[in-house]
Each structure stands twice: as structure tokens, then as C-alpha cells.
Amino acid sequence: MGIFQFKNVSKVFGGLRAIDDVSFSIDQGEIIGLIGPNGAGKTTIFSLASGFTPPTSGKIFFKENRIDGLASDQICKKGLCRTFQVVKPFGDMNVLDNIMVGSLLHTANMKKAQEEALEILYTLGLVGVKEQMGKNLTIADRKRLEIARALATHPKMILLDEVMAGLTSVETREVIEMIRQIQKRNITILLIEHIMQAIMSLSDRIIVIHHGQKISEGNPKAVSNDEQVIKAYLGEEYHELT
């Protein structure tokens, strides 16, 4: 069994089947890309995995323990956390204190929490803005802070939701390197991203969701050549460039 498993998971909102009998497994230390058109169900998968919404049916496992039905804070304490596409730092707290909030999930010792936060600041290149208020950060630094707060919770797995959206090409390359450094810590990553060059270069495997169903799974080359994926999402233009 991998570190994380979806087993025949479905989610119905009223009459809408947002996720339809989706199954997949992720091994420790992998980077898995999750792609598909807008509205395909990718963020719903994140919400189900992280406890923000319960599945209608199916089972979700993390480290061989069933987690569907647990609250989001309980799942985070077990080592699975997520970031959000719309980043919302604590605006009236500085960067260091924002990261300490994540550290305090596992310790009430303020000195220890600050030491952990400082280590993450240096690792992610945020030390230069540690005294800045969250509301004054650039988009790129807010994205870094979102990842930093997640790291501070001592995760074994992180769900990254479009952490490169809105960034310049230089900033995107910096985040790609940041994700690779996180993987070197043996942290498993499930990544939603629309920048195909980035997700294809980062991912060990890619899962494709369309209309709430998994339509393809495999290594980046196999997925980019899958006719269903080309038709539903990538388009012939992308295929011809690869």
C-alpha cells in the first residue's frame, strides 16, 4: 500500500457528481501531477483528501489509516497538509509569525516554533522578508509563504494547488526548484498545475481528471501521448510541441 490512496471515491453535490468513482495510489516520496480542465474536479479531490469535505462514497487512506471522515486539523496532524490556490496569509502578522502558526501545530514551545520557522525561512529564500506583513507581500512571496506554512506542520505529504499560477517565468523556475528541494526531504507531493512544462518536468506520474472521472494515469510521456488527454485537455498544439 502506498502512503496515500483513493479507493472508488465519489462526491455528489446536489445533483452534480463532482468526483465519480476515482481510484489512485501514491508512493512515499513521489511527485504526482493532477491535471485536467477547469471544473474537472481537481480541487474537490484536494478538499476530500484534506478533510475539508467528506466523500459521498469510497475510502481514503493515509499511511495505511483511513482518514475520510476526519476533520482537516486531525488530518494535518497526521502529516497531510494542503496549500490553496488563492493564498491568504495572516495579513497583520509578519512572515516569521505566519510560519510559526504552522509550527505551533506540533509544539507549544514558542522558542522551538521560532527556530523551526527560521530554518524554513532560510530554506525557501524568505529570510529577506521575514519582518514584512503578510498583506504587503508580492504574489511570488505569498506563494512561498503558503508553502512555508505547510512545511512548518511537519508534513509527510503536501497537496500543492497551483503554486505557480500568476508567477513570471523566473519565479516559476524558482518554485520548481523549491518543490524539488521539498521532495529531497522525502515528502510526497500531489500537485495541481496548469503550466504543462512545469508539471511534466516535475512529475513522476500524472493523473488526468475530466468531468470528475480519471481518464488517464502514467508517466508524463505516456500521458501527453494519450488521445483522450489530448482531446480533453492538452490539445493538438501542445502535443505537436512535445
Image (tube, helix red, strand yellow):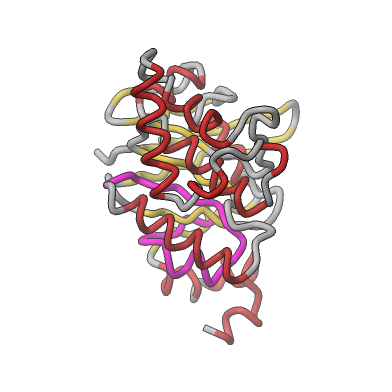
* Frontmost residue, 28 versus 149: 149
Q: Position of residue 87 (x, y in %)?
A: 65, 41
Residue 63 visible, this angle = yes
Q: Position of residue 171 (x, y in %)?
A: 58, 64
Q: Residue at x 64, y 70 (%)?
A: 231
In the image, residue 194 above or below residue 15: below
Determine the image quadrant of residue 221: bottom left
Q: Residue at x 59, y 48 (%)?
A: 143
Q: Position of residue 192 (x, y in %)?
A: 55, 52
* Frontmost residue, 227 versus 121: 121
Q: Quadrant of the N terminus?
A: top left
Q: Going by the picture, which residue comes out furthest to the left?
A: 1
Determine the image quadrant of residue 107: top left
Left or right, 235 with reference to 61: right
Residue 232 visible, this angle = no
Q: Position of residue 50 (x, y in %)?
A: 50, 29
In the image, residue 17 above or below residue 52: below
Left or right, 192 with reference to 122: right
Q: Which residues are magenta?
A: 186-208
Q: Is residue 42 magenta?
A: no
